[in-house]
Amino acid sequence: MSIIGIRGIPPKLSLMQFIRKLAHVLNGQFEAFSATHKTKSKTFYLKLSPNLETHSTIEIINKTRFPFQLQAFLPKNVINIQMPQKTKKIPNTLRKALKIPLNFTPAQVLSITHEQIIMEMLSKFTKLYELSCSTYHFLLKTLYQTVYEKLEKVQSQGEFDSCYGLSKCYRDHYPHSSDIQLIKDIYMNYQLQMGLPETELNEKEFCEYIVECPDESASCTNLMNLSHEYSCKIISKIMDHINSYDFDKNRHPSAAIQVRQHIKKLSPLMPQIVKSIMKNQFNISDNETFELVRVYGEPFLPNKKIMNPFLRKFSYKSAERSERIYNLITVKIPTSNYFKILKSDGTNIIIEGHFQVLNFDPKVKKPKTCYIRLSEDLDPQKVSNMIRKLRIGPYKLYAYQPPDIPNLKIGKGLNKVKNTINNPNLKPRFTSKALPVVKKPLKPTKPLKPLKPAEAKKNAKVRKIQPIYSKEMLIKYTHEQIMLEMQSKFPGLHDLNNKVDDKLLTAVGQTVHKRLKEVAHNENSETCRKLSRMYRNIFPHSGDFQLISTTLYRIQDEMGMKRVQVVEKDLTAAIIRPYDFDKISPEQLQECSSKYSEDILKAVLDHVSNLSTTIDPLKDPIEEAARIKVKEQLKNMSPYLPGIVKGVISKHLIPQKACYYVVKIYGEPGLPARPLLWAWMQRFKMFNAIRSERMYNLLLARTPAAEMAALLAADGTIMGGSKLIIRPADTPYIRIPI
């Protein structure tokens, strides 16, 4: 930090007043202190943050016109300046109003963000500290270290000037839903190390916060009545004691008599004194008291328009958003509403918003189709579902998300209609422009004649119907797809599995199968796609590496092997094997085939030249005559045999280069929207894209051989909030016995 001096400050201007005036001019943090005092003017010194450049700051201060003239300068001898131990900074309220960020070093940003994330976990999981005590705090120590390593990994991927940005990026990589799985894995690892029986943690009980409302006997009015009752008894005893004073000078010293006389004079004021003491000691006051409550949002906090109505229910006095973690807000709540807001833990806030009506589609007239632009706060799927439930007399509405929007004539002022979908207090106001699609009521028609079987077969439409599986087969097929996805994403998993005698994949597969059983038992899923989606909602992709590493450490401990640290990048890196067929160049194949074709040709010609044409009298003469004719024909063809042999070898031994390849595209946490994905696929000339029926986030497609290398290099692309994992379709897969 650099230090500059400022002269010409009026004597009556205090240091804090000077800081407040200067904060509006300088867009950055600074500390101020006073080293000299003069009668006519004072000199203050500023300790600038790294964000403020010294010379530009001096120019800004000298050019700015204050009610008094300031002169900024660089001090000659900074060492001789007596700097106090405590310097004054910009007040937090003013700093936040001016949007001046806090100044932290990268190490401080990492440390503070780590502290805030651990505090969030301890606040959410109320039984975490008790569970850690039972493990002699092995659980919290390991959790601290794991979260710190993950934060270091996230920080290394980009530059973060604030804790707000680092915490948000951390939660993008490791969402809140993966916290409970991380705690479960650490606790299971501790149980295995100590040889304890495995006990599973129930997430609902682990997060349960018991709100004990106070009894009526402990209310403020009852306390007031009790204090008044006991204060009267205390006053009566004190007054009886004062009235029983003895003022005999022969029996008591003069000093004691003077004190008693003074207390006697104060006796009329004694009831008021006792009542005030009781009131202060028991903290009974008529003024309203407040409590501070921390409110976390998962995955983030709603905006002000949505959050303020929720907080107004509890008559909040103030709300302050944290600068050290992105999803925390501290609210000041009256004590009377303290338990009410605690009971609203886990509330899902319905997002409300506005929309704009564009115009009708000119091409479609019956029924009319209108296009509406929704605000960012509204979810298109939720709005569509709500509109489908609405009816206007006999008319029924139908809402959908169009793949493309036609050219519409839009006026200067768009029709803005207040949203009444999520507001039950307002009656919905419908206009002709606000209807997405209006269908006329169906008129009763004459019953149709039944078709003959032959006509029914001709008019029947072929529809793609997903097969119906039993619950066991549903779990089996979904388990295969999840393990295939895991082995495709982590190619290094097979080598790691070989080092521990093929126990790693078996143990991971059994854990996944056990989880799938629990999900299928608790949720109603009819297809593999639905079951795989539900599984990933509970166990996201970010927890797969944690599952693999904890299972590997457990197996290594059981086998008595030394633990080997596993890095996620090493597992996800593509493995190029030297014996892969596609890695051999066509020139090498041509050389090998020509070498062996000469040996084969020599053996064939030797065999043909050594063929005997003499008749054996012991055998059937007719068959022998036929054999001799065949042998003679072969000898006549001997000049053409080299060309025939080379043609057969080049056709069957030298493979033809494939003109296209099949690739698998996985989406984490899901596949992007179809328009985004289709536009991206066009870059690599992909075609014949088929979405998997058994895995919700898998897409199979073909791509030309020339685009294959560029497509595999695009692995890890972020699109629409989803990460794409791209792998060849012929990746090795090991089936896991269940």
Image: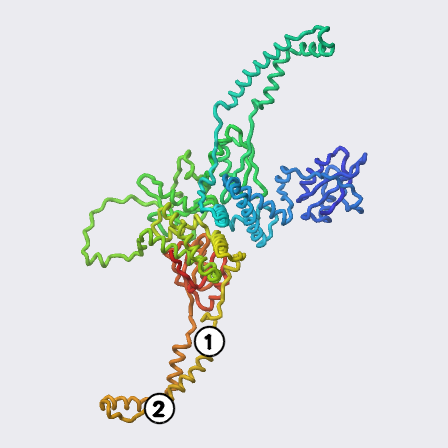
From the viewer's perspective, is the residue at label 1 or at label 2 nearer?
2
In percent of width and height, residue 465 lies at: 31, 55
Q: Give the residue at mark 2.
A: 610
Residue 38 visible in the picture: yes
Question: Residue placed at 52% from the left, 44% from the top?
Answer: 135
Which disc number belongs to residue 193? none
Q: Is residue 302 left or right of residue 626?
A: right
The kind of residue tagged 2 is Asn
Q: Is residue 536 left or right of residue 259?
A: left
In percent of width and height, residue 419 lies at: 44, 39
The kind of residue tagged 1 is Pro
Q: Give the residue at mark 1.
A: 586
Viewer-nearest residue: 736 or 90: 736
For marks 1 and 2, the one nearer the N-term is 1
Q: How many marks?
A: 2
Task: Identify whether 401 is placed above or below 351.
Answer: below
Task: Identify whether 270 is placed above or below 675.
Answer: above
Give the class, few, some or many, for how many residues have Cα within 10 Å of label 2's Cα (few <14, many ≥20).
few
Give the class, few, some or many, for how many residues have Cα within 10 Å of label 1's Cα (few <14, many ≥20).
some
Residue 16 sits in quarter: top right
Viewer-nearest residue: 191 or 695: 191
SS state under label 2: loop
Q: Quadrant of the C terminus?
A: bottom left
Residue 301 visible in the picture: no
Q: Residue furthest right?
A: 39
Task: Identify whether 632 is placed above or below 298.
Answer: below
Task: Identify whether 258 is placed above or below 399.
Answer: above
